[in-house]
Amino acid sequence: MPSRKKAVMLLVLVVVAATASLGVRALSGKTTDTTFRTAKVERGELVAAVTATGTLNPVTTVSVGTQVSGTILQILVDYNSAVKRGQVIARLDPATFSAQVEQARGSLMAAEANREKAKVTAVDARRTLERTRRLLTDGIVSQSELDTAQTAADIAQAGVRGGEASVIQMRGSYNQARTNLENTIIRSPVDGVVISRSVDVGQTVAASLQTPTLFSIAQDLTRMQIETSVDEADISAVKVGQPVSFTIDAYPGESFKGSVTQVRNAPVTVSNVVTYVVVVGVDNRELKLKAGMTANVSIETARRENILKVTSAALRFRPEKEKGPVPAAPSRGKAGSGEKVYLLGPDGNPRAVAITTGLAGDGFAEVVSGGLRENDAVITGTAGGKKSESAKSGPTAMGPRL
């Protein structure tokens, strides 16, 4: 019996020693208790884009006003009315202007009559001068009488010129009155569609300092444009002709196409933020898009086909043992260098892999060079503190129960 008890005690000591050894290995970091999230390295297409918001507007909008003041007598068009160039769209009350035309015409006729009277007087004065000159030669009149006749002839001739000037002035007034009367008829200057009407019948409009706007006419609603504000950090990537996709809240789930038609050089500064206006041309043949709609714009600045790409989350991941701030992923469309990502090593711990990135966009970065291959599982983050299976199933430090 004593020998049997010694054998049992020896077995217990051996098990305890083995358990202690396993515990030391677990505490020494040979195994990990962290579960990592991973994503595969893919091969495919990568698009870099600049996003912005803007407002839809017709390419050409003409404001129709009036050059004369008056009361709106008649309105012949309304919102959404299609109009042709020269078409009458409204009339002002012409009564006052018709009276002004008649008054100006009368003044012109009086001036013309005075001009003719001055001409007759001038002819008579010229005849008197010629007769006096002959009588002076015969010694019948004196030199002073000739001088008086000459003065009268000159005055009569000046009266003719004054009459001509008066006729010109009155004719100008008459033409102005006729023009004002014609301006009481409001015509469309272009072919288009009325998108705004600012007056009603009976309303008085005043054109004293500036021409009041009565109507706004969109020249061609089948062609629209979006004016967007692009941040100064992204404007260098935007070029005329780049393709654009955008969405409208009125049509959820539907994407529309366009292209960059203009990049304006004038900066716009609001609250110390500098932006530049980018104009996007849009085909609106179906007339779905309306002026004033807000567009969420994505301007495609670069595209790569059949490239190796890694998720941007992998570029931001750093193990806990590596101190320091988390690096930022490359900016949209911009290349990076000296990047590194992490793969799971044979021991279950992160292993750094150096890479060089290129184009960035859509939450991915192009892998230009480095130790990554397609389908490699790169670490993107941790899933929390779950124990490894070996730590769960191993024996306890107390050893087996007897």
Image (cartoon, grey):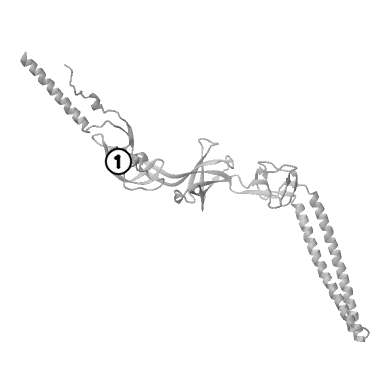
Q: Nearer the viewer, residue 321 or 236?
A: 321
Q: What x and y, as percent, mark residue 142?
A: 91, 84
Looking at the rendered structure, the secondary structure element under dot 1 is loop
Q: Residue furthest front?
A: 271
Q: Nearer the viewer, residue 191 or 212?
A: 212
User: Could you tell whether 381 is left or right of 134 in the image?
Assistant: left
Above or below, comparing residue 80 to residue 8 in the picture: below
Circle 1 residue? 323
Q: Residue furthest top?
A: 1
Instruction: Say which quadrant the C terminus sits in.
Output: top left
Q: What x and y, as percent, mark residue 261?
A: 52, 50
User: Could you tell whether 300 is left or right of 341 in the image?
Assistant: right
Above or below, comparing residue 88 to residue 402 in the picture: below
Q: What x and y, as percent, mark residue 352?
A: 28, 41
Above or below, comparing residue 15 to residue 351 in the picture: above
Q: Nearer the viewer, residue 46 or 65?
A: 65
Q: Does any portion of residue 38 appear in the rendered image?
A: no
Q: What x and y, as percent, mark residue 40?
A: 33, 37
At a point 31% along the width and 45% down the height, the residue shown is 355
At a point 13% along the width and 20% down the height, the residue shown is 12
Q: Does any portion of residue 79 appear in the rendered image?
A: yes
Tell me the quarter of the picture where residue 344 sits: top left
Crowding around mark 1 (Cα neighbors within 10 Å: few <14, some 14 to 19, many 20+) is few
